[in-house]
Amino acid sequence: PALPAYRLGYTGRQGTRKVDVMFFYQVELLDKTDKVIEILQKDIFSINWTYDTLGGCGQCQIGLRREFGNYGTIDLDYGIKIRRMPNPYTVSWSSGVDSQQLRWSGFVQQIAPVFDAKESVKLNCVGYVRQLQYVQVPNVTYANVDVTSIALGIVNSYALPGTRVLNTA
């Protein structure tokens, strides 16, 4: 069966020819143990995200067609993953996770009501690198050690444990 995919598109130019390009995305909600608990597609009416030079995934805003008093199983610090999916009209979904490209990941930092013509919910999310602002590093003295070793020691001892930040270097 086809998985739901949020369709995003833009109109660009290829030489002098106008080209419509369509991408398909899947937005996953993960609990605090990284288990996918919901695919948010059917309720999304707006989505945008950014990338930061340092740290990768920046901010993400997701608008959901849900009442604020009944927005479901979403909680603060729950994970969000946005994957680019194959076009469901031209590619078989049986190709699995390998055909999905992770485009953004982070966590829900704020859940805000939007009181417009129709009530909705806005999720303000940030990349996992923002978890570093909560990490406490004790006053430690290093002697006869190069700067690279000090930085790696701090990252491996204090930043990586207890956060979802990954060391991809």
Image (cartoon, rainbow, N blue to C red):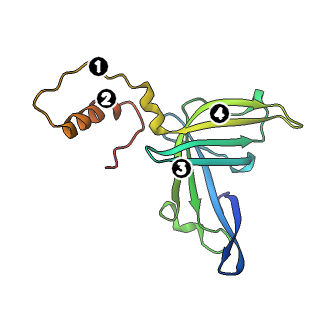
Disc 4, SS: loop
* Amino acid residing under circle 4: Thr
Marks 2/1 in contact by CB < 8 Å: the verdict is yes
Looking at the image, tell me whether mark 3 or mark 2 is earlier in sequence order.
3
Disc 2, SS: helix
The Cα–Cα distance between marks 2 and 4, rounded to whole angstroms, is 30 Å
The Cα–Cα distance between marks 3 and 4, rounded to whole angstroms, is 21 Å
**Residue lying farthest to the front in this orientation:** 16
Instruction: Say which residue appears at 16% left-offset and 37% top-offset.
Output: 146
Disc 3, SS: strand
**How many residues crowd around disc 3 within 10 Å: few (fewer than 14), some, or many (20 or more)?**
many
Tag on residue 104?
3
Q: Which residue is mark 4?
A: 73
* Amino acid residing under circle 2: Tyr
Q: Which residue is mark 1?
A: 138
Instruction: Say which residue appears at 67% left-offset and 30% top-offset.
Output: 111
* Amino acid residing under circle 1: Pro
Looking at the image, tell me whether mark 3 or mark 4 is earlier in sequence order.
4
- State whether residue 69 is above or below residue 21: above
Instruction: Say which residue appears at 68% left-offset and 57% top-offset.
Output: 4
Return the x and y of residue 128 as percentages of the image width and height: 47, 38
Marks 3/1 in contact by CB < 8 Å: the verdict is no
Residue 14 sits in quarter: bottom right
Disc 1, SS: loop
Tag on residue 158?
2
Residue 61 sits in quarter: top right
Return the x and y of residue 99 as percentages of the image width and height: 51, 65
Looking at the image, tell me whether mark 3 or mark 1 is earlier in sequence order.
3
Answer left or right for 163 relative to 82. left
